[in-house]
Image (cartoon, rainbow, N blue to C red):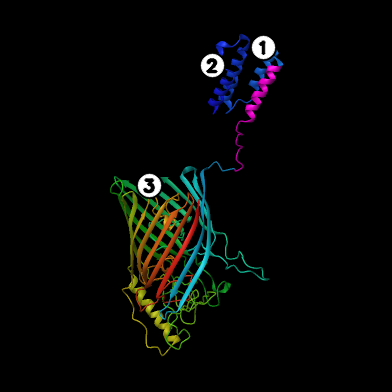
Amino acid sequence: MRRCHFQNFMTQFRVANFRGLRPVHWWRLALAVAVGTAGLAGSARADTSDPAVRSLIGTLLQKGIISDDEAGKLQSQMDSQQTNAPVPTPNSIWKINPGIKDLELYGDLRTRFENRSELDPSADKVELQRFRYSARLGIRGEALDDFYYGFRVETASNARSTFVTMGTSASGIPYQGPYGKSTAGINIGQVYIGWHPESWLDLTVGKMANPLYTTTMLWSRNINPEGLAERFHYSVGQVSFFANFGQFLYQDANPVVESPDLGLGAPGYLGNGNNIFQVAWQSGLNYQITTNTSFKVAATLYEYYGLQPTTSSAGLPPYFSDTYVGEGAYAGPGTAFGNYGNSGYQSPAISTLTPLTGAYIYGYPNNQVGINNLEVVEIPFEFNFKISQLDARIFGDGAYNFDGAARAEAAQAAYANYVTQVNPNNGGVFSAQTHDVKAYQIGFALGNQGSLGLANGGGEARKHAWEVRAFWQHVEQYALDPNLLDLDVFAAAENMQGIYAEAAYGFSQNFIGAFHYGYATRINDKLGTGGTGTDIPQINPINQFELFQLDLTFKF
């Protein structure tokens, strides 16, 4: 820009044709050179406020080389040029600590129409038609000395969903009218600090995006685990090896020591609980076979530490340490819960200190949240390739609970005890289903270049980007942790199998339209469908599940 102004100024005074100028006009050339030099050295335009320019004009006028009239015309011309020049951008009002290398503002605003339904074995049905919204807003970036950071807020407190249903806010007392705000809030979804001192090492602490390579079969896409994570990466030729480890605080059970005479807990209840940790050990590889084909696979072991069953002196609600049952409230004809599909859910959800009959474990008469006897191995994988100019992916996951037989036996015994106490004349319950301990998923995705992942919230948001994907999923009753399952994939219930499909299209650089469809049925008719799906908690077992969602997202 400086060069351009200088050339314009030279042209204005016809310097290129100076041979024809009278000697008395040599000052024009000197002034042009002075002003042009000042423009090149100090600013993007010839600035008459520059002391050197004003001094030159004054000197020429004083020595009689130019007249008062000529000086005035020259000053007017240069003032006009300055007035029409771009206004310099003022300094930012934001002050950033010099230790911060960069800062990114990101997030998304989402609106959704949803139709969700569940049928029990008697064909009794619950159907929801909801309009929903979600907002996520975060900052992330890098600091000096190889540190990084992140912080994000979300609209809902549910760990497995950021959506809020329109029209459900309480109006308050006294009555305040419709369109309330009470069901939406500002909740911290992520807050973490990380350090990557080497290209092969990454350490994170806080509430973070899931650091593991996994799928929605085991983890809801919205869960952000809390604790520590260590990630290692090393490449050899075309193969990239990785190892990820996580130590996640599953439940804070403080105080871990409580004297009985201090009155902190319930009567006769000491507390003395242990904090519960979920520990993940993962290793895998990503093999770049050719330019357009690659294969990624990992093996992950999940273990739980600190489990302490509820007694008069140990354990805390919501009874993660206690026996998972997974059954509904049905105890036989003529009982309080004579409908086979009734989960027995009580709203508002309540918990008591006794995990057997007469108690409600987080709203249910039978435990749906227990993580006893879980030692799960997961093997997620994907194969990426090209179909013409399109990106394609075959993906899947498999899992097996090595302690699943013991989990099934404990569940059967707890349910039999419940039925006996509610209905002493019952004819017995099912035998332990010790083979229902595995889960698997297999799917296919197709999209234009760089768009894979767009349909499930990932991928690159850009105009005309698109993706379609579908998978088949099968999760048995005693295979997985019921508290981590995705609410949209078959109601986060175990003992369910079916198909899930979704598609997305980028209308612009930021706006994405998507639809999601799921259909599933019960696997083992002898068992319930365990879990704590919060959308329709009243049905267990679920005989049939169906979901349709239509989304519009603004992503930035």
| Side of 265 where 550 appears, left or right | left
Q: CA distance from mark 3 to mark 2?
A: 61 Å
Q: CA distance from mark 1 to mark 2?
A: 21 Å
Residue at 67% from the left image edge and 24% from the top image edge: 76
- Label 2 neighbour load within 10 Å: few <14, some 14-19, many 20+: few
**Between disc 3 and disc 2, whose residue precedes?**
2
Q: Residue furthest bottom?
A: 425
> Which residue is labeled 2 in the image?
16
Which span of residues is magenta-colored?
69-94
Between marks 1 and 2 in the image, the one whose residue lies nearer the viewer:
2
> Which residue is labeled 1 in the image?
65
- Which amino acid, by three-letter code, is at mark 1? Ile
Which sits in the foreground, 201 or 428?
428
Mark 1 falls on what kind of element? loop
> Which residue is labeled 3 in the image?
200
**Between disc 1 and disc 3, whose residue precedes?**
1
109 in relation to 401, above or below: above
Which quadrant of the figure has residue 486? bottom left
